[in-house]
Structures are given as C-alpha cells and as structure tokens.
Amino acid sequence: MLRWITQTIAVTALSLRMIPQRLGSSLVAIVGIAGVVIVFVAVLSIGEGFRAAMTVAGSPSRALVMRSGADSEMVSGISGAEADVIRQAPGVLRDNNVPVVSAGLYVLVDLNKRSTRTAANVPLRGIEPAALAVHDEVKIVEGRMFRFGTNEAIVGRAAGRQFAGVDLGSSFKSGELTLTIVGVFTADGSVAETEIWADTRLLQGVYRRGNSYQSIVARLDSPASFDTFKNWLTTNPQLNVQVRRESEYYAAQSTTMTSLIRGVGYAIAALMGIGAIFGALLTMYTAVASRTREIATLRALGFNTTSVLVSVLTESMALAVFGGLIGGVVAYLGFNGYQTSTMNFQTFSQVAFAFAVTPALLFQGLTYALVMGLVGGLLPAIRAARLPISSALREL
C-alpha cells in the first residue's frame, strides 16, 4: 500500500509539472470550464437575488391578513368593518393602547424602466400612519415622510433607480392620480424598496374603493403570539380571512420565479457543460498522447497502472479547479450586486433586486467544474492505464 501511494504521488507530481508545457491545450479546458461556471453562477444568482429580496421583506413578528382564499394582495379584499375587528385581536402589539396595525391597498401604476424605456407595472401601496411602526426596518434616507391627507408619496430606493418619473421632487400621473415624491426610503434591500407608498385614504378615493382594504399587516407583541392572533381571527364568525406570517407569505411569493430561474440555469449549464467536457477530453487525450512513451516507461519500471490513471485524472481535476476558481471570481466581480428588476408572477408587478453571488453558489460552481473535470478526464485516464507497454515504447 505504501509503495502504491509513493508511486501515485510521484507520477501525479510529474503530471502536474508538465501542465505548463501543454499550456495551449490546457487553456482550452480551463477557459471552457470557466465559461460554464460563469454562466451557471450568474444565472442562479438572479434567483438568489430575487429570493433574498422577497424573504428579507418578511418578519416573523409581523402577520399578514388577507381575504380567505386569496393567494396575493392583488385579489384580496377586506372591509372597513372587518379591519376594525382585526385591530382588536389579541397578540397585536399596542403603543399607548393603540394597535400597531396598518391596513393598506395594493395597486399597480405604469412607469417606464430607465434602461429600456419600456412600460412596467410598479406597486403603489397605500399605508396608514402606523406603517413605519409596523415596518421598523423602513428608513427615510432622502427627503421626508409624506403628509397624510395630501398627494405626496415616498419611493423605495430600488424603484427610484430602476424606473423613470419617480425622482425626489418629481411628480407623476397615473389615471386620475397625481403624486409628488417627497422622500426616498430603504427597507434592508427587500421587495418593499420596489414600491411607492402613499396615503391609503387617498387611494381609496381615487380608485373608488370606498372603505375597504386589500391587506392588513399587524405587528405582534412577540413571534410566539402568532397562533393566538391567527386562531382568534380565523374562528371569529364576523370575519372571512386567512392569516400568515409575513415571512412565510413572501417566501411563498418567491417560489415560482426562483424555481423557474434555477431550472433555466441548470439546463443552460448542462448544455454548456457538455461542450466543456469535450474540451477537457481533447485536452487530456492530447496530454496522454504526448506522454505515451513516458507512461510506458514508467509502467515498464514497475509503476502501477492505477497510479497512472490517478495521475491523469488529477491533472484533469486540477485544470477544472483552475477553471472553476477563475469562473467563480469573474462571476462574483461581474454580477454580484448588479441591480435589475423582473416580474413577480404572483402579483404581475415588478420587483427590483440585486444579483446575489453567494458562497453556496460559488461552491456549486466549483463542484460542477470538478464534475466536468472528472468526466472529461476519465476516458483518457483509462486509455493511459491500458496502453500496451511494448507498442507504446515504439511510438514517436
């Protein structure tokens, strides 16, 4: 066993030292694998960024109330009388005996994307004065909070970057509604930063909603109060509502898009990976062909065929590691944090988010590179191990 290990180390070290002498063919494999890793990580980082924007928006200490059977705020409806009952539910945080609850409307307005000038559905959310206490992560970073009872609004920073007409101090018109942007807010990079916030009462009047809402967000006195809050509402004969943790609601909202992006990413990577494997195959066959007499000499001197096989596979894996690392670095530098927006198919509204090249994605990319190196080097390694010594020594 010790002899085999010694032989394997010696032959493998020799193979690795020979890589610079085959730099041209080696670069073919490295560049091919790096390209696959770049595309693989970049595409999946879209899904990770979208998922992060959605899940960060939710908090386990907040509960979202919608009409029973509604799968999104767009198709929900809650009357003013029902909203008053919901405010009295046990488990709601109270500030000076006032429930920290915000009832809101969720409508879409047409704005143009800055990059393409194409129309996009941007969420316009009606909020109540308690909204900033409910969403304590929201901070006004430019301008000021709008005044309730006026045609003022604040815009999320991501929406301000992605869409035209919502700069600080500007006004935009949508149907009968005209809003002036007086502030810009952040929300820890969540989906809320894609929204425009205005007075719920204003939107009720403009969109002729009467005394009705689409959702109610309540801040709980603790995450453990959720079951008490939910059970009280869902068993109340005055109400026909469903209650979900806000974090669970947004996580479910991200599922469709994230799954779609991951499916596309894996499919593209699989197709490109086939090409990279052929590149690795050609590279390693070239390496074996150029070392035919050397390999035969080593075997004639008593080196084990398994040691030769391991050395060729190790060389292929080393090239794959180089390609994977280069691809990961390029993907991180080129795509991490890149701002874009896409459609949320649950609400048909735009969601602005940043690509997220996470350590987990980089690890997946490197693992995929190693798989390509292993598959690409396997057949050449077997050929090297099976070379007839007598005929190989006669080859030029």
Image (tube, rainbow, N blue to C red):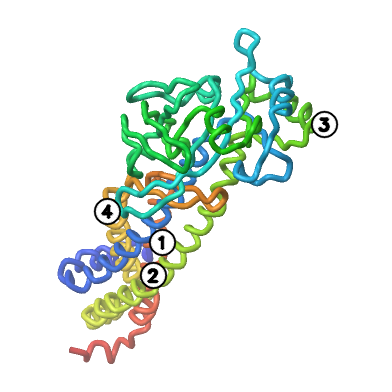
The circle drawn on residue 166 is none
Q: Secondary structure at mark 3?
A: loop
What is the number of the mark on residue 235? 3
Categorize mark 1 by other alpha carbons within 10 Å: few (<14), some (14-19), many (20+). many
Of the two numbered discs 4 and 1 in the rendering, the one whose residue sits closer to the viewer: 4
Work out whether 19 lies above or below 43. Answer: below
Residue type marked 3: Thr
- What is the CA distance from the residue labelled 4 to the residue labelled 2? 18 Å
Does residue 229 appear left or right of residue 160 in this picture?
Answer: right
Residue carrying label 1: 368
Q: Going 27% across and 51% down the picture, which residue do you hit?
A: 334
**Which numbered circle lies on residue 273?**
2
Q: Earlier in the sequence, mark 3 or mark 1?
A: 3
Tell me, yes or no, whether the two marked residues, 1 and 2, touch with CB atoms within 8 Å.
Answer: yes
Front-most of residues 164 and 192: 164
Quadrant that contains the N terminus: bottom left
Residue 213 in picture, x, y percent from top left? 63, 33
In the image, residue 292 sits, relative to residue 333, either above or below, namely: below
Residue 381 position, x and y percent, is 36, 76
Report, in whole angstroms, how far the alpha carbon at label 1 lies from the one at label 2.
9 Å
- What amino acid type should be assigned to the residue bearing mark 4? Val
What amino acid type is highlighted by mark number 2? Answer: Gly
Near mark 3 (Cα within 10 A), the count class, few <14, some 14-19 or many ≥20, is few
Q: Residues within 10 Å of mark 4 (few under 14, many from 20)?
A: some
Quadrant for the C terminus in the image: bottom left
Which mark is drawn over residue 330?
4
Query: x%, y% of residue 219?
Result: 61, 23
Q: CA distance from mark 3 to mark 1?
A: 51 Å
Q: Are the residues tagged 4 and 2 within 8 Å (C-beta)?
A: no
Disc nearer the start of the sequence (1/2): 2
